[in-house]
Every structure is written in structure tokens, then in C-alpha cells.
Image: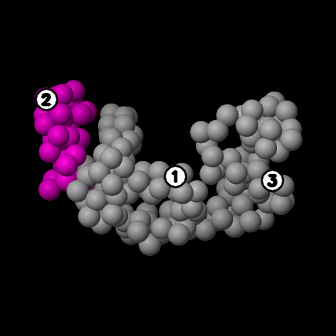
Amino acid sequence: MNYSPLVEAIREGDRKTANRMIAEATPILIRMLMSRMNAKREDAEDAVQKMFLYVIPAIRSGKIKKPTALLSYMILCCRHNYLKELRNMRHEPIEEHEHEIVNSSDPFEYLKLKDIRKIHIECVNSMAEQHREFYCFWLQNQDIEAAAIAERFGISVTNAWTRKHRILKKLRESMLSMLNS
């Protein structure tokens, strides 16, 4: 199905057409997650809703460059949202489900994402043990309060925030260095 008219409707502010097309796409995407990913209905509905919360502003801001590839992009986002939620519920690394992630309509883009994921893993593995443990704990518990992280690692709340931001900064720098080399 072609969702180019959805892109046009959102960009032009045609809510009636956009709402109709979203209403048509939603059950299709939910069924896709339920059949291909064995998702529960509630989890599939959440993943689809989160996808639209990201995709609609992306369309408005012009981040969606190929309206004809919107369906592939929506499917990819839905699957990633579902896998992210699955990881958060089970505290499983996403790599265990990597084979389930849909290839993007642009094979080069998919390869680039796969390379970035490999670089991320390499950079995390190269961290000092203490930083890697902190980062992985925070990554698996992103909704946790800073006070709980501070208690878990025996540090102050301020130190927890500082450590998190310093680790993220070093990780970003390390990944950029590897990407540019």
C-alpha cells in the first residue's frame, strides 16, 4: 500500500485524510507485529502508537525524505519499538533479536545501522569495567530514578548524573572516532 498521501496530508495539515489513513494503517501494523513477532495485542498497539508519535513529527519536520518508503519505515519503527519494549521487560540485549529486525527499504541504510550497532558494542566493551557496568545497568533500566542508581552504585545522586553524562560523552566521542576512521 502506498502511504505517500499520508505524508502529503500531514505536511499540508489535512487532519481528516491523515486520521483516516492512520486508522487504516494501525490494524495492519498491529496484525503484522502479532503474526511476525508473536507480540501480544497490547504490546503491538503500544509499539504502533509510539511509532506514530515519532513518525508524525518526523514527517512535519521533513526528516522523511522518501514518502514512497513510508510503509517500510513505519514497519521498521514498529518492530524496533516492540523489540525495545521486549528488552526492557525481559532485560535482554537487543542483539539476541537482531535477526528479527526488518531490513530497511534502502539496503545501504540497513548496513550502516548494523555497522553503527557493531561499533557501539565495541566501544562499550572497551570501557573500563566500572563504567561498562554502570552504562549497561542504566541502559537496561532507563526509567529508573537517579537516586536508585546512586544507591545501587554507592554514590551520590549528583555523582550518578555526572557519571552518566561523562560516560555518554566518552562513548559518543569513541563512536565518532571509529566512524570517522
86 or 124, nearer to the observer: 86
Q: Earlier in the sequence, mark 3 or mark 1?
A: 1
Instruction: Give the x, y percent position of residue 132.
Output: 77, 57
68 or 18, nearer to the observer: 18
152 or 135, nearer to the observer: 152
User: Residue 76 appears in which quarter of the rendering?
Assistant: bottom left
Q: Which mark is residue 16?
A: 2
Q: Earlier in the sequence, mark 2 or mark 1?
A: 2
3D distance between C-alphas at marks 2 and 1: 36 Å
For the N terminus, the image quarter is bottom left
In this view, the mark in front (3 or 2): 3
Mark 1, secondary structure of its residue: helix
Instruction: Give the x, y percent position of residue 165.
Output: 74, 40
The residue identified by callout 3 is: 131
User: Residue 10 appears in which quarter of the rendering?
Assistant: top left
Q: Amino acid at mark 1?
A: Met
Residue shown at the point (64%, 61%) measured from the top left? 120
The residue identified by callout 1 is: 89
